[in-house]
Image (cartoon, rainbow, N blue to C red):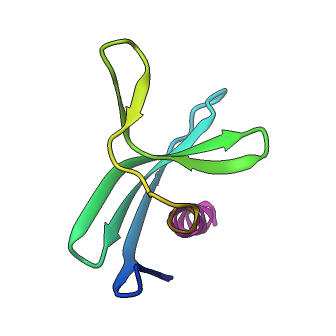
Amino acid sequence: MEVFLKGEICLKITSVNVRKIEKEDSRMKGIASVLIDDCFAIHDIRIIEGDNGLFIAMPSRKTAVGSYRDIAHPINQEVRKMFEDEILEAYKKEEE
């Protein structure tokens, strides 16, 4: 899937790798790494089982006050959906 941003920039996910996590009583189901345009990688994207199904959580770190802040994340809903669709599709293929 490609997403065009600002009419000129094209963003394409060129590779998704998923590692399943099989712990009982854990909401985290896997970890994904995404390669964008064969030149930029994002690691440690979590695949989580929520109340309404699977969703992704971008890599984050704990701040000095104890909350968490994303290190890398999509800026708009269109790009977030692209990431989620590609990662969850790769996760489902791993289940087969």
User: What kind of secondary structure does the magenta stretch mostly adopt?
Assistant: helix
Q: Residue sitting at 50 percent across and 67 percent down?
A: 79
Q: Residue furthest right?
A: 52
Give how far across and how far down residue 27 sits, in percent. 63, 34
Q: Residue furthest front?
A: 6
Q: Who is closer to the viewer here, 83 or 73? A: 73
Q: Is residue 38 left or right of residue 96?
A: left
Does residue 79 sit above or below 51 in this rendering?
Answer: below
Q: Range of the magenta residues? A: 81-96
Tell me residue 38's x, y (percent). Answer: 25, 77
User: For residue 92: magenta?
Assistant: yes
Q: Position of residue 40 (x, y in %)?
A: 24, 67
* Residue 76, horizontal then vertical, whole percent: 51, 61
Residue at the image position 37 percent from the left and 84 percent from the top: 10
Is 80 covered by the magenta stretch? Answer: no
Q: Nearer the viewer, residue 49 or 74?
A: 74
Residue 32 lies, with reference to residue 2, above or below; the image says: above
Where is the C terminus found, in terms of image quarters? Answer: bottom right
| Front position in the image: 92 or 70 | 70
Identity of the residue furthest to the bottom in this view: 8
